Amino acid sequence: MSLLVTGTIGIDDIVTPSGHASRVLGGSCMYFSAAASFYSPVRLVAVVGDDFPDSFREVFARFPGIDLAGLEVRKGGKTFRWGGKYLKDMNSRETLFTELGVVAEAPPKVPDSYRDSSILFLANSHPGVQLGMIEQTPQRKLTVADTMDLWINIAKDQLLVLLRKVDGLVLNYDEAELLTGRPNSVSAGRHILEMGPRFVVIKKGEHGCLLVHRDGICSLPAYPTDAIVDPTGCGDTFAGGMMGSIASATPADPGSFASIRRALVHGTVVASYTIEAFSLDRLRQISRNDLEARFDEYASMVRI
């Protein structure tokens, strides 16, 4: 099944208790695509400025499964930039700066060759932009969106329209509470289903994730590791592993409870590698065989 993702590609400055990384490749679309490409070809739709470093293109070469026909380089534009600092427990962070650049301009268009995509993932961006992407992929069979507290606060009306048009939503536990007003994640998840989606995946950091589906509930732990360097992009690679595995399995019903539940394990495994280094450095070092080995290890740990 053909997989398309749209979101941001940017330049990050990151400070964690483990160290500091300056001007490294980041963005929701980049992390997602790298993770998904281990499982399935992925079509990327994003925009950068003409200041996008040539050295970053070498990173793309490490992930040959990423189709770059939808990457627009906007002349005279500035690439999205973000800086963040993680606190001691790594669960909380503060934004040091955000420079929207080309992300604040008109969104990129979906190439004609992508319009037949059957699986669409809307990585974190303004819900109005996400709605526009839905309109450009008329043959989609599964549509999943990510969101964040910013859009819940400033664009909730458009977000609610979006939720009536997607099959699934991915968000953090605090964002689920903000959206629904319910501190209990199960209750929040069920309330989100009333807004339209067939399922919601609530990310809970070191405590794993929760799937609330119209056909059941599933809770999975995070992969246990002490190699925690940089949590940036873990949520996006989690989604990339999840959606890439669905695309590669080509299930008759990609949004079924069984399909999503199994896909969550793949997402958890990829994210467990992302956190072990800054930016995409750890993902550049591993292979699909590494992922399969850790998948088997994880499955053995959670099996009762």
Image (cartoon, rainbow, N blue to C red):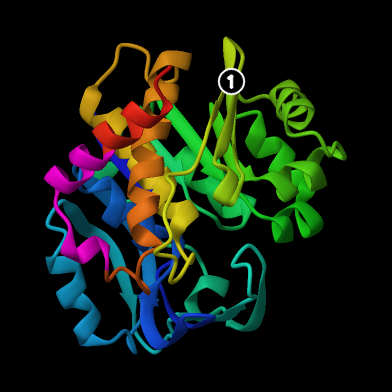
Residue 228 can be seen, yes or no? yes
Q: Up-down: is 93 above or below 193?
A: below
- Residue 118 lies, in percent from the top left, at 32, 29
Magenta segment = 282-294
Residue underneath mark 1? 198
Does the stretch in magenta take in 52? no
Q: Up-down: is 278 above or below 168?
A: below
Does the stretch in magenta take in 292? yes
Query: Residue at coordinates 25% horizontally, 61% vertically from top-left?
Result: 283
**Magenta part, dominant SS:** helix
Query: Residue at coordinates 34% horizontally, 35% vertically from top-left?
Result: 298
Left of 76 or right of it: where is 102? right
Q: Up-down: is 132 above or below 259?
A: below
In depth, the one of 152 and 140 nearer the eye is 152
- Residue 204 lies, in percent from the top left, at 61, 45
Residue 39 can be seen, yes or no? no
Q: Amino acid at mark 1?
A: Arg
Q: Around disc 1, counting alpha carbons within 10 Å, would you say few (fewer than 14), some (14 to 19), or many (20 or more)?
A: many
- Residue 10 lies, in percent from the top left, at 42, 75
In depth, the one of 278 and 58 nearer the eye is 278
Q: Quadrant of residue 33?
A: bottom left
Q: Quadrant of the C terminus?
A: top left
| Element marked by disc 1 | loop
Q: Up-down: is 104 above or below 202?
A: below
Query: Residue at coordinates 51% horizontally, 37% vertically from top-left?
Result: 221
Q: Quadrant of residue 1?
A: top left
- Residue 187 lies, in percent from the top left, at 79, 26
